[in-house]
Image (cartoon, coloured by chain):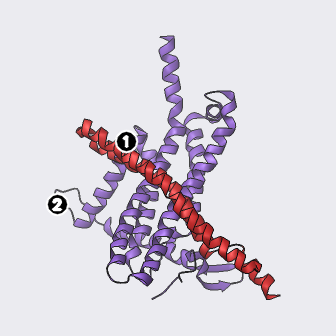
Amino acid sequence: MEVIRIDQISPDMVILLQWGYITINATLVYTWLIMGILVVGSMLITRNLSTDITVSRWQNLLEVVVSGIRSEVRDIAHEDVDRYFPLIGTFFLFILLCNLLTFIPGYVAPTSSLTTTAALAVVVFFAVPYYGISKQGLGEYVKEYFRPIFIFFPFHVMGEFSRTLALAVRLFGNIMSHEKIIGILLVVTPLFFPVVMQALGLLIGLIQAYIFAILAMVYIASATQAHEAAEHKVAEKKA
Amino acid sequence: MDSMSIVAMASIIAAGFCMGIGALGPGLGQGRAVQGALHSIAQQPDERNSLTRTLFVGLAMIESIAIYCFVISMILVFANPFWGFVIRKAGG
């Protein structure tokens, strides 16, 4: 079953319906599929939560995933875990499920399209000043851009944009390149090697989901925590 | 040689060189990163989790450079922006 030809570089080009200005392409369909799986799965599992010693295995699975993400976020955010945990957890779960279902035939990962990854990176781009300003206030946040020395302002701004671009292209490049490689390998050596490469693709998808979530957390933390380090230094100098 | 074959030839050669040269730097960089990580893990085995986490984040950032080169190669081969223009010009 062939959803996307080998010379179509992203699932955006597979257009299923076109109605006036609205086009339904494969990326949209698969994104909504992933969203549906996440939401419906969570609703079904959390219907009868129990706090006994014996829990159902699905609840156990969810607890493992949630506590794992929480401990990773706590390693970086130290005290404000519950503030950032929903956003980072959503990034991780969405990208993880997108990347992991690629072994199903007929499925094309929506993160193999630059539009999806760019959208996620733009969310991080706006989340960083949002959390920075809501934690430190507008004046202190803007002063951070001039912090080591006055002339660093354009470098910080360029850094913000290039970090966002790097987030988007890293995820897109990894997943899209993997799908193309498997497509090409199926033409060249069809029997065993593509299966090994698909296993490698699962590992790459997991690592890229983790990297995206952790980098988003690190960027947000660097915008909200730098102030405390500077204040500590000033307090130490005075004392 | 008409412009169609020049564009095709240049794209293919550029795609090959781009990926070939672009894989050298990140390969060396990742080797040194893993070397540093193994050294640290050997010195402090208790911190293995934190070191492994940092290693993976660093590897992903170094990998990005190779991914950029790969994306350029893919674009040159599969989604070449000049190909449509040249086809139209050749068509008349």
Using the rendered view, name the quadrant where residue A139 is placed: top right
Q: Along the line of sight, which residue is nearer the eye, A209 or A123?
A: A209
Question: Residue at left 48%, top 44%?
Answer: A218
Vertical order, A7 against A166 (above or below): below
Q: Position of residue B15 (x, y in %)?
A: 59, 68
Q: Are marks 2 and 1 on the same chain?
A: yes
Residue under label 2, please give it.
Answer: A54
Colour given to chain B in the rendered image: red
Q: Secondary structure at mark 1?
A: helix
Q: Residue at x 48, y 22 (%)?
A: A232
Which residue in the protein does label 1 denote? A75
What separation in Å lies between label 2 and label 1 (alpha carbons)?
29 Å
Name which residue type carries label 1: Asp
Q: Point out the frontmost of discs 2 and 1.
A: 1
Q: Position of residue A195 (x, y in %)?
A: 33, 76
In front here: A193 or B54? Answer: A193
- Chain the render paints purple: A
Does residue A66 sit above or below A47 in this rendering?
A: above
Secondary structure at badge 2 equals loop
